[in-house]
Image (cartoon, coloured by chain):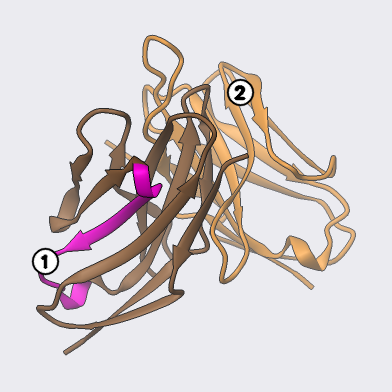
Chain colours: A brown, B orange
Amino acid sequence: AQSVTQLGSHVSVSEGALVLLRCNYSSSVPPYLFWYVQYPNQGLQLLLKYTSAATLVKGINGFEAEFKKSETSFHLTKPSAHMSDAAEYFCAVSRMDSSYKLIFGSGTRLLVRP
Amino acid sequence: DAGVTQSPTHLIKTRGQHVTLRCSPISGHKSVSWYQQVLGQGPQFIFQYYEKEERGRGNFPDRFSARQFPNYSSELNVNALLLGDSALYLCASSFLNGVGQDYEQYFGPGTRLTVT
């Protein structure tokens, strides 16, 4: 079975500081991995995805994530936080043979302090 | 292009009632998925439909059903509503590649269902 663990339900950073949101996955087969962002009262927006190509994935809004098979991790980073980055972030995993079924983590709320 | 649209935006129902939620996918997308997001949790997969056929089902009771229409829009039906069905219901559409894989799911804004 697949699962996703997001360490830290809340992360607080100062504006301009590095953002690091942690995601570890469990999968018996090569996974597809995703990061989504959710702003209040809105749906999910795809930030970036890993689908077995380059292990360092660049997404929108300056975010990137690195797939590390040995650590079963897919942490999300951004060099410099903006106030507009404050939102809920979800890591998700799916399998190649059932790519339609996304398994989500419980989310990390990012707070950005001025 | 318009994104995924869902209706209604908000809905309040009483326990035991039935509800129908609607979703229109992005133009050209033939696959629609439904997810339930309970407050404070990540979304949970309910169904996916492709070309009007159920392609996958999550761990939800038979009170939950769905269908997809020839224009690829979809309905999610929930019977005998329980308080625990209160959640944000998200619809996502995707375009399958040549080998039947859908890498990206595009989500709508959701329908907020409150069961009292």
Q: Is residue A17 left or right of residue B11?
A: left
**Residue at the outermost top position:** B98
Q: Residues within 10 Å of mark 1 (few under 14, many from 20)?
A: few
State which chain disc 2 sits on: B
Q: Which mark is residue A79?
A: 1
- How far is disc 1 from disc 2 in space, using C-alphas? 45 Å
Residue hosting label 2:
B69
Q: Nearer the viewer, residue B57 or B68?
A: B57
Q: Is residue A81 above or below residue A67?
A: below
User: Could you tell me the amino acid type at mark 2?
Assistant: Phe
Rendered location of residue A93, percent (x, y):
46, 42
User: Could you tell me the amino acid type at mark 1?
Assistant: Pro
Q: In this picture, which residue range is highlighted in magenta?
A: A70-84
Q: Quadrant of the N terminus of chain B?
A: top left
Q: Is residue A80 magenta?
A: yes
Q: Is residue B34 above or below residue A47?
A: above
Q: Nearer the viewer, residue A55 or B8?
A: A55
Q: Is residue B61 above or below residue B94?
A: below
Q: Nearer the viewer, residue B61 or A43?
A: B61
Numbered disc 1: secondary structure: loop
